[in-house]
Image (cartoon, rainbow, N blue to C red):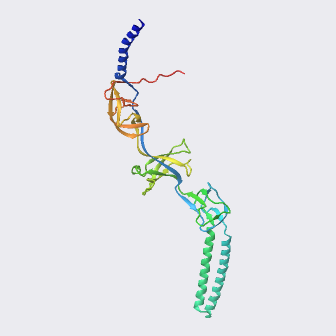
Amino acid sequence: MMRKKWIWTLVIGAPALAGGLFWWRAGPLTVAVVTPTRGPAVEAIYATGTVEPTVMLPIAPRQGGKLAQITVDEGTLVKKGQILAQLDDADLDNTVDELESRLRLARLNLQRKEDLASRNGLAKADLDQARTDLEMAESGLKRATALRGFMTLTAPADGLILRRDGEVGQFIPAGQTVFWFSCCAPLRVTAEVDEEDIPRVRVGQAAVLHADALPSAVFDGMVGEITPKGDPVARSFRVRIRIKDPARLQVGMTVDANLIVTERADALLVPSGALQNGALWVLADGRLHRQGVRTGVTGAVRTEVLEGLAPDAQIVATPTEELHEGAAARPRPPAAAVAP
């Protein structure tokens, strides 16, 4: 008797199970749908750069010597002509004293020979030689005085000391930079732009800047210069960006730059993940339809749709391979709120 009951259960249950399986496979699909939104669409070229002064000069001695005194440090605001450092010039002082003595002697010698020449007691060649000796003494003294002046490093203009490389007592060879000095113009950003993007960059183009050191700050800028020659190794071009308000930026900061190519304030936007090969799946009257669209600005999260989509369309948010044209579908209901 028990065995017959099991047989009847299987006979009755099998058709029901088959019907449920058929309904599950052939019934309406449940899909998550979204509607397009309105918002800004911005197409930008990304680049990284560094904050730097528009004018930056190295200050170095023209004559080697030992650093005897440093009067300013990094971050010091200086005036034109202000003494920044002094190199040991004792040897040049002695040379100047010696040449001054020679100059006095040459003048006295010329004066005596001119007196003799006036009484016809001196050959003209001797007088010319005395004049030449005086000119040579004057030239030698001017040169030694100039060399001594090179031992004093001064500010070429009003500006800021960015960096100091040298300590008192250190020997500084001729031409070795002791100070990096900036002046005369505001800060700027020098960025490297990929060669594939450079045709879309132009002078006057707006830029939005962000520095990792100032995570909550956004700076507005404008493309000021584009170098005509690129780097064939890095495959990039150098772009100079003027900063409208560089108040909190400092020289040497790393900056992310977005050069604005296109900006529309009221664009029709859809999730980028809803697009498949330039088309969207749209749910209308309980059926799925593959809708080709023309897109504009494409981002990681949102993509602009220019043509082919109604503003109130229901779009499948995450299309899968099981979707096909004309398939019955219904929107997935929103998740119910869970009470705390």
Residue visible at 60% across and 74% down?
143
Residue visible at 32% across and 33% down?
291
Residue 133 position within the rendered picture, expressed as x and y whole percent measured from the top left: 61, 83
Q: Quadrant of residue 31?
A: top left
Q: Quadrant of residue 115?
A: bottom right
Q: Is residue 94 above or below residue 117?
A: above
Residue 2 position within the rendered picture, expressed as x and y whole percent measured from the top left: 42, 7
| Residue 50 seen by the camera | yes
- Viewer-proximal residue among 312 and 117: 312
- Viewer-proximal residue among 31 and 86: 31
Residue visible at 45% across and 50% down?
193
Image quarter where the N terminus lies is top left
Residue 236 position within the rendered picture, expressed as x and y whole percent measured from the top left: 44, 53
Residue 128 position within the rendered picture, expressed as x and y whole percent measured from the top left: 58, 87
Q: Is residue 181 above or below residue 117?
A: above
In the image, taking residue 285 as reference, residue 38 lies left or right, namely right
In the image, taking residue 330 as reference, residue 164 lies left or right, namely right
